[in-house]
Amino acid sequence: MRILTLVFALAAFGCAAVIALAGPGTQLGWWTWGEGLSLIRKVSAPVELGPVGAPPILVAAVLAGVTGLASLFMSARGIGLFAIIAALAAVAAAQVPLKMRADFEANPFIHDVTTDFDNPPPIIAGADKDRINPPEYLGGDMVPNSDKTVREAQEEAFPDLTSRMVNASLDETAEMVRVILRDMDMELLDETLTDDGWLIEAAYTSRWFGFIDDFVVRLTPEGPRTRVDVRSKSRVGGSDLGANAARVRAFFEKLESAAS
């Protein structure tokens, strides 16, 4: 019984470790981001167990938990406690792919959002960086497994992502934007001032996998007020799981608060 409990506990810990290390391993160059995501899928995707299917990580968690409790009652407290801790670690780690799947199903399969479809803020500073997705806005492209274009998918899923007007001068708004971008842990890449206004470019790097998204803010003076347009695009990946839209919303919430 002890050996069986140890095997199940190690399996549960192993599955949890795979998920926990998938992102850091990508950033350390142990594997590509695609391979990192594939590791998560391998331990979290349901496999057939007779008439039903269950993810390996949850199977390992259940077996480790059951044998761990049994070991406690059989006076093998050390290994029993170890198995229970392993089961809890696996259950906690399993929440990550579950959340990823929920976000995938709840959002369109896109990775580029903008507040101005006709004249999207351009990605210039990040255009030559290491990337798979081109810097150009491809709003007319069809979304995979959908009858909608990228633009149509965004309009349907995120109708609130529109241009905003700020009751502040161009330079005042630009300074607010700089502060907000730093507050959102973004790296400022470049700033360009033309007769049309400011173009402020930044990049956000996710903590877990190190995914980089370009974030561009265009400020256009309109009398005493300033029009604000934003674009956020992932450099790699087909679906952003709604991350770019959420980032734009968070930016506007902070801007509204700063301008009030």
Image: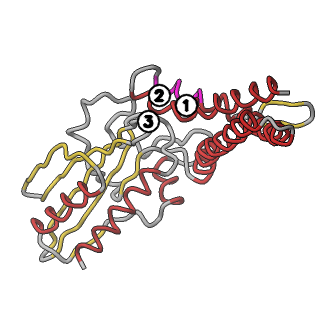
Residue 74 at x, y percent in the picture: 86, 37
Callout 2: SS: helix
Does residue 72 lie above or below 3 as drawn?
below
Image quarter hosting the C terminus: bottom left
Does residue 234 lie above or below 157 as drawn?
above
45 lies left or right of 183: right
Circle 2 residue: 33
Q: Is residue 56 visible?
A: yes
* Whether label 2 touches label 1, CB < 8 Å: yes
Identity of the residue drawn at 77% across and 41% down: 65
Q: Is residue 147 visible?
A: no
Callout 1: SS: helix
Identity of the residue drawn at 14% across and 63% down: 175
Is the residue marked by circle 1 packed among few (<14), some (14-19), or many (20+) residues within 10 Å?
Answer: some
For residue 209, which numbered disc appears in the image? 3
Circle 1 residue: 37
Q: Is residue 110 magenta?
A: no
Residue 214 at x, y percent in the picture: 31, 43
- Residue 69 picture quarter: top right
Pointer 2 or 3: first along the chain: 2
Write down the region rendered in magenta.
32-39
9 lies left or right of 103: right
Residue 119 at x, y percent in the picture: 29, 53
Q: Which of the two residues, 146 or 17, is positioned nearer the viewer here?
A: 17
Residue 215 at x, y percent in the picture: 30, 49
Q: CA distance from mark 1 to mark 3?
A: 9 Å
Query: Magenta region's main secondary structure?
Result: helix
Identity of the residue drawn at 44% across and 57% down: 246
Which residue is at the far bottom? 260
